[in-house]
Image (cartoon, grey):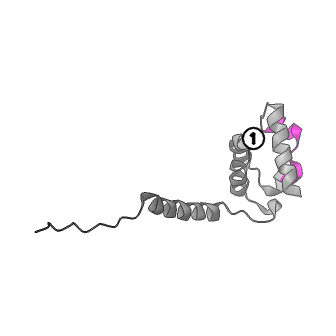
Amino acid sequence: MASPVPAKQQHSPPATASASASASSAASSSADLALPAHPPQWTVDDVCRWAQTQPYVAEVAPALREHAIDGHVLVNYVTNTVLADELGIAAFGTRVRVLEAIEALRW
């Protein structure tokens, strides 16, 4: 008499469950990061969220918050001199990258 073969258990691959959780998490993160379309209307929080997504700009996000830089101020009044003298950004290269990112917002 042959011994019965155990029934095969079906398991979801771990990657599938993880991928679903990651996709769901990414979707909610994207929704959380959605910014108003018109940068001059951004709040200080919006500016800081935008800054965190930009290379070189992320490191100056604390200064943007400290100095209450909202979208209107960001696109109309932030200059190389303001970055250096008012916000204390000493590195010229960082200031140039920040100004390039701001210029991209204007267009």
Q: Quadrant of the C terminus?
A: bottom right
Q: Quadrant of residue 35?
A: bottom right
In x, y percent, where is residue 40? 82, 60
| View extreme (left): residue | 1
Query: Circle 1 is placed at which residue position?
Result: 56
Looking at the image, is 15 positioned above or below residue 82? below
Which residue is found at the position 73% from the left and 54% from the top?
47
Q: Quadrant of the N terminus?
A: bottom left
Residue type, numbered disc 1: Tyr
Which residue is found at the position 75% from the left and 65% from the top?
36
Which residue is found at the position 63% from the left and 65% from the top?
31
Q: Is residue 54 left or right of residue 72?
A: left
* Magenta stretch holds residue 76: yes
Q: Is residue 95 left or right of residue 23?
A: right
Which stretch did the figure color magenta? 75-87
- Magenta stretch, overall SS: helix
* Magenta stretch holds residue 44: no
The count of marks equals 1
The front one of 48 and 73 is 48
Looking at the image, is 42 positioned above or below residue 92? below
Q: Is residue 100 left or right of residue 47?
A: right
